[in-house]
Image (cartoon, coloured by chain):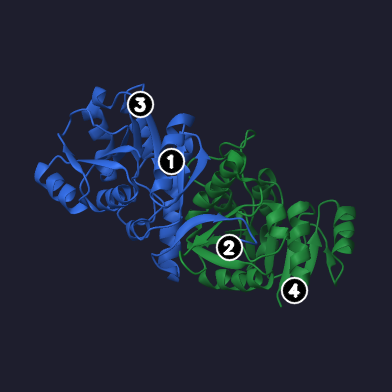
Chain colours: A blue, B green
Amino acid sequence: MRRISIIGTGNMASAIGALAIKGGNTVEVIGRDRAKAVALARALGGDATIGAWGAVPTGDIVILAVLFESAVEIVREYGDALVDKIIVDITNPFSPTGSGLAIPDDTSIAQMVAEVAPASAHVVKAFNTLFRDVLASGGPRDVFMAGDDAQAKASLSAFITSLGHRPRDVGALSMAHWLEGASLLEMGLARNGLGFTLSLGIDFGGAK
Amino acid sequence: MRRISIIGTGNMASAIGALAIKGGNTVEVIGRDRAKAVALARALGGDATIGAWGAVPTGDIVILAVLFESAVEIVREYGDALVDKIIVDITNPFSPTGSGLAIPDDTSIAQMVAEVAPASAHVVKAFNTLFRDVLASGGPRDVFMAGDDAQAKASLSAFITSLGHRPRDVGALSMAHWLEGASLLEMGLARNGLGFTLSLGIDFGGAK
């Protein structure tokens, strides 16, 4: 059992929150609009609680389930409230057409988040390669993650496993750039006739 | 049956050549060092022929099975000998440590090849996400490809299918940047304990 805080009240927050509760984790929902957080916590059921915006989250793992445009600013605003936390960036910075990324070429949202997070926090990129419905439909699917702290990735791995998915460590946080691009590849594949039930995963050949 | 020319005489040339002959395609081997081309053609057997360096390749599909450092220069050197050809870039521009790419952040080897190729040639990125032994061991594995010309991708798809693998179209040539990064993700996964028999593939969930 892990203690999870989810910042955000949208589709991804709902999908992760539902799987988290099903997996026996405790979930705190945090929204700038408290009414939305209350509504999501009620919809999730279980013992989901509501956190105050900007206060220290109760979870050791804080899922940043917000639009990519807000992610960096929210972490900056939270500041020291995120000391020692594992911050999970799940965003995809798609350009308006969905054919490119709306960030500088040499970084990623995850790295930009890390730059403004407290030094003792550990940022991990994860979940961004799963379309919302794919994530929600249960697993197991491969959940790729990138981060610089092995212990943070181990904690997150246990959480991912509790969701019924498979944690897959791709390496350092700098790899978040390529994970964000991997979502673009998925968009391309989905649009070229393969549909939005797909996700990238690991093929070992032979027996699955 | 397709007519394939392979520029290069190394591991990837050998792996693709062997599968191509097994799949009923005709194969021409081209090496700057003609002795190596002769040796590879003999090793491949079938009706593999040897092409003269710099001459117009006999294949409609020209596989650029060379190191990434040479790819752009070779296509420039070939110049009009590649008019109307489908040029397949399979390179991975790994940095010396294998943790980053040794190219500018806003492009790919495939796009750099396209810049120096004849205007009537069609460059497609493909095969780079399969480690040599994975490619050689037969399939089916997903072979991701990126290119701007639908007909060229259709021709290449038929060739990939003849090799026993699955062609997977990720979109425009600009996506080659992310395919080159996808190989980095594979390197990260392989080094983090999953081994070098893996490849990225498409998971549709449920039935495969």
Residue A158 is tagged as 1
Could you tell me the amino acid type at mark 4? Asn
Residue B203 vs residue A59: left or right? Answer: right
Q: Is B95 or A22 nearer to us in this picture?
A: A22
Q: Which mark is residue A98?
A: none
Residue B142 disc label = 2
Residue A153 image offset from top left, x and y in percent: 45, 35
Residue on which disc 4 sits: B25
Chain holding disc 3: A
Q: Nearer the viewer, mark 2 or mark 1?
A: 1
To which chain does the residue with label 4 belong? B
Label 1, label 4: how many angstroms apart (C-alpha)?
A: 48 Å
| Left or right: B193, with B57 as reference point | left
Q: Position of residue B171 (x, y in %)?
A: 47, 62
Please tell me which of labels 3 and 1 falls first in the chain.
Answer: 3
- Chain that bears disc 2: B
SS class, disc 4: loop
- What residue is disc 3 on? A121
Q: Where's residue A206, x and y in %?
A: 65, 62
Image quadrant in which you'd find residue A7: top left
Measured in 3D between alpha carbons, the distance from the residue under mark 4 to the one under mark 3, in whole angstroms, is: 56 Å
